[in-house]
Amino acid sequence: MVIAGFGFMGTFLVRYGFSSSAFNLLVAVIATQWSLILNGFESWLQSRRIQINLKSLVLAEMCTASALVSVGTVMGKTNPVQLILIAILEVSGFILNGWLLQTFLEVRPLNCAMQLHTFGAFFGLMLTWALYRKGSETRFEKEKMDGKSGLFSMLGTLFLWMFWPSFNSILMEHRDHGQRKLGVILSTYLALAVSAVAAAAVSVLTSPRGKINMYHVQKCSLAGGVAIGVSMSVVHLPWVAMTIGLAAGVISTLGLRYLKSTLHSQSPHRIPSRNPDMALRNNTY
């Protein structure tokens, strides 16, 4: 999911396809190793050993995914050295932020799924602000897309779309004998399915020629999976998951249609990372 999904998803730029895949792999492996070291620091203090198991690898992949979300906002504007520094800084900040939330605000570890998207989104916006240069809002020839690059990018979206339900469910505990895991998988799938339909519908309705913009479908089909991430433990009814997916798909597509030129952002994690507040206000633990 991290290597193939994010790697292919960033190939939509004609002049940046090969570099995007290579840089994605570079950021992913460095961020994963660094997060394993930082997450294992507490166990190292106790036993002088860093424990590596399935749970630590999952947490490391979450940190890596957050770094890749932010990297998507500065795609094509950074070199490998800058990307490595960004990955190290963000993983460190992500782990520190999670420790502060769980220590002082007593946030449950399950909610770190939304921390992934929210922290990555705002860290990415900070990067765009820091790297902004006058005249950068003007489109360049290197920002063009074609059918081949769009096809490979859509392949990355399909990878993420297929594996997102299992990504959300792996954070659930085993004490419910797999029933809640199955519920999370079904809820995530419903949210993803509805958000994909909503993205296609809004794309057609907002198009002057009444045609589907595959760029909208590619970027906004994942909005449902992002939005339901934080509320997956309290969503028990199918219509709730579908409503979250519908809202995420509509809002993300409208934002991509009318706000992209203002935000100059390439990542689909901005608006849907704020959408699940609706679910938390209408459900109780």
Image (tube, helix red, strand yellow):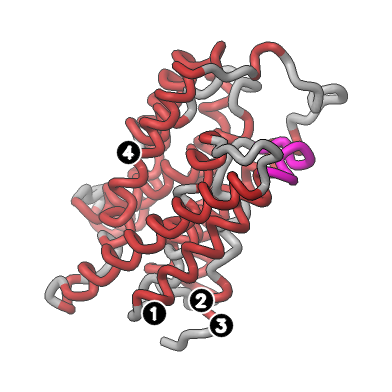
Quick check: marks 1 and 2 in contact, CB under 8 Å?
yes
Q: Earlier in the sequence, mark 3 or mark 4?
A: 4
Who is closer to the viewer here, 231 or 247? 247
Q: Determine which residue is flagged by label 3.
A: 281
Residue 65 picture location, percent across and down: 43, 43
Q: Position of residue 236 (x, y in %)?
A: 33, 80
Question: Which residue of the protein is positioned furthest toward the right in this rendering?
Answer: 134
Residue 77 picture quarter:
top right
Q: Secondary structure at mark 1?
A: loop
- Magenta residues, start to end: 257-265
- Residue at numbered disc 2: 279
x and y percent of residue 82 in the render? 59, 24
Tell me the number on the disc at residue 159: 4
Residue 44 visible (yes or no):
no
Question: Within 10 Å of the Cα at label 4, are there few (<14), some (14-19), or many (20+) other Cα atoms?
Answer: some
> To which residue does mark 1 refer?
234
Magenta region, main secondary structure: helix
Mark number, residue 175: none
Q: CA distance from mark 1 to mark 4?
A: 26 Å
The magenta stretch spans residue 260: yes
Query: Which residue shows up at 29% across the image and 47% down it?
Result: 163
Q: Label 4 amino acid?
A: Phe
Label 2–label 3 contact, CB within 8 A: yes
